Image: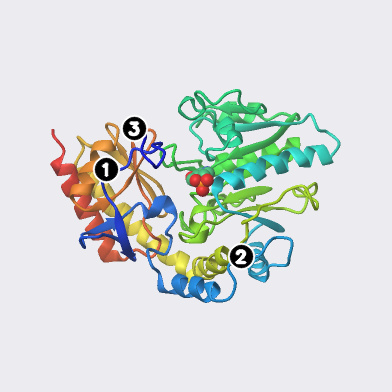
């Protein structure tokens, strides 16, 4: 008999009743060190008092208002995002997938508005992940995600990851946009080198194609800058954000320049819940905390500490690990084999990690993880690695 919850996930036999900072706690009181953070979502940890206060204060005022009306909470968050980024305008969604859908629609509308409606090809990268909607799976194109869901939405062309020349060659004056993650998350914590992001920006400037960055996982302070593309000193035309921006409350956004958003006039897009007052009250508090230079400096300091300890862990277990990857607190341990056994061994040591493609174990802790918790996490990973059969 099919489970009452559609069985599209292979779930671990673990259920958490509450959380405190970097800890997720089961009903019997067992504490797990949470280095997954809901897959880069709980950027300020579980039950963060500032976020609880922002959410409950809003809950006592008004929960939901249609986008038929002004939503001051939404405008406040948009003001903050515009102030801190390249963007001139923001549309709020409830998830990264919805942000990807709008980004794709915005690209198409941009070229339609420019009088070139056949310019639809969006170049993407193999191993990418942009969500699970029909558009987002067509964009990423991986066999695992698209099999059985055809026919796929046309207009995407995938190029191999890391093939700089192929990527550059694929961008022509018929390319509508390039859509890419500055650091691939699901793909295995694979960062695009700064020079590659700069090259993509130049290719877009040369051809007129739009640069669309998917910062759903790598954004919101995760890499040590508010958004990962800042490391390369470039700016996109359109950017998708989600995961961390709500700190655990469902919230996403598409940020865009005025030029890229030119076609998106009244009636061209909408959402019932997108930019709901509860979500925006929390998102505003997350932004106030994370988009602060002192906070980001701490993320970088902790990232350095964690990386150093992980390098030592890799050196101590050459039979398990190949190396450390990633940027800031978006870290990956490249393993010799698929990381599923290591994730499981981690459960026995009461530490939560997340597997990714390319034999990579993801470590995506809350950005306010403490130094002691970093040391404890690496000690638990060390024991988990020890416990694997030779
Ligand atoms: C998680 C993710 C998405 C999809 O976000 P959802 O909120 O799950 O819809 C899109 N892009 C990237 C890079 C992601 O990591």
* Residue tagged 2: 64
Quadrant in which the C terminus appears: top left
Front: mark 2 or 3: 3
Who's the residue at 19% across and 54% down the image?
Answer: 379
Question: Local crowd at mark 3 within 10 Å, few (<14), some, or many (≥20)?
Answer: few
Front: mark 2 or 1: 2
The x, y position of residue 158, in whole percent, is 58, 27
Question: Local crowd at mark 2 within 10 Å, few (<14), some, or many (≥20)?
Answer: some
Q: Is residue 319 above or below residue 169?
A: below
The x, y position of residue 303, in whole percent, is 37, 57
Q: Nearer the viewer, residue 363 or 196?
A: 363
Horizontally, residue 341 falls left or right of residue 128, namely left
Secondary-structure class at tag 2: loop
Horizontally, residue 327 falls left or right of residue 277, namely left
Point out which mark residue 265 bears: none
Q: Earlier in the sequence, mark 3 or mark 1?
A: 3
* Residue tagged 1: 343
* Marks 3,1: beta carbons within 8 A: no
**Colour scheme of this structure image?**
rainbow
Who's the residue at 57% across and 23% down the image?
Answer: 150
**Cα distance, mark 2 to mark 1?**
39 Å
* The quadrant where residue 100 appears: top right
**Cα distance, mark 3 to mark 1?**
28 Å
Question: Local crowd at mark 1 within 10 Å, few (<14), some, or many (≥20)?
Answer: many
Q: Earlier in the sequence, mark 2 or mark 1?
A: 2
Front: mark 3 or 1: 3
Horizontally, residue 90 falls left or right of residue 310, namely right
Secondary-structure class at tag 3: loop
* Residue tagged 3: 1
């Amino acid at each position: 008999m099919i489970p009452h919850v559609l069985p599209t996930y292979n779930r671990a036999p673990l259920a958490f009743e509450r959380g405190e900072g970097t800890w997720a706690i089961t009903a019997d009181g067992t504490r797990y060190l949470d280095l997954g953070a809901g897959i880069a979502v709980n950027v300020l940890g579980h039950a963060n008092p500032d976020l609880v206060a922002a959410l409950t204060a809003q809950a006592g005022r008004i929960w939901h208002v249609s986008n038929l009306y002004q939503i001051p909470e939404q405008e406040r968050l948009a003001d903050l995002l515009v102030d801190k980024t390249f963007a001139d305008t923001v549309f709020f969604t409830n998830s990264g997938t919805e942000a990807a859908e709008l980004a794709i629609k915005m690209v198409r509308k941009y070229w339609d508005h420019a009088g070139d409606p056949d310019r639809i090809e969006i170049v993407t990268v193999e191993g990418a992940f942009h969500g699970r909607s029909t558009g987002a799976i067509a964009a990423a194109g991986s066999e695992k995600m698209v099999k059985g869901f055809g026919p796929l939405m046309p207009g995407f062309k995938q190029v191999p990851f890391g093939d700089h020349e192929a990527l550059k060659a694929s961008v022509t004056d018929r390319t509508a946009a390039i859509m890419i993650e500055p650091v691939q998350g699901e793909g295995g914590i694979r960062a695009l080198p700064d020079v590659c992001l700069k090259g993509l920006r130049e290719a877009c400037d040369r051809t007129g194609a739009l640069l669309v960055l998917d910062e759903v996982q790598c954004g919101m302070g995760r890499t040590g800058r508010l958004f990962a593309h800042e490391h390369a000193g470039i700016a996109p035309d359109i950017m998708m954000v989600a995961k961390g921006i709500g700190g655990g409350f469902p919230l996403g956004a598409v940020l865009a320049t005025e030029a890229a958003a030119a076609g998106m006039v009244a009636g061209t897009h909408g959402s019932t819940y997108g930019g709901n007052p509860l979500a925006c009250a929390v998102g505003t508090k997350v932004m106030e905390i994370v988009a602060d230079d002192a906070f980001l400096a701490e993320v970088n300091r902790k990232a350095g500490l964690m990386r150093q300890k992980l390098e030592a862990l890799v050196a101590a277990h050459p039979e398990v690990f190949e190396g450390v990857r990633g940027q800031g607190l978006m870290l990956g341990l490249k393993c010799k084999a698929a990381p599923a056994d290591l994730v499981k061994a981690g459960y026995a040591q009461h530490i939560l990690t997340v597997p990714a493609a390319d034999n990579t174990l993801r470590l995506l802790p809350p950005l306010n993880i403490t130094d002691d918790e970093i040391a404890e996490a690496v000690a638990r990973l060390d024991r988990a690695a020890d416990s694997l059969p030779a």
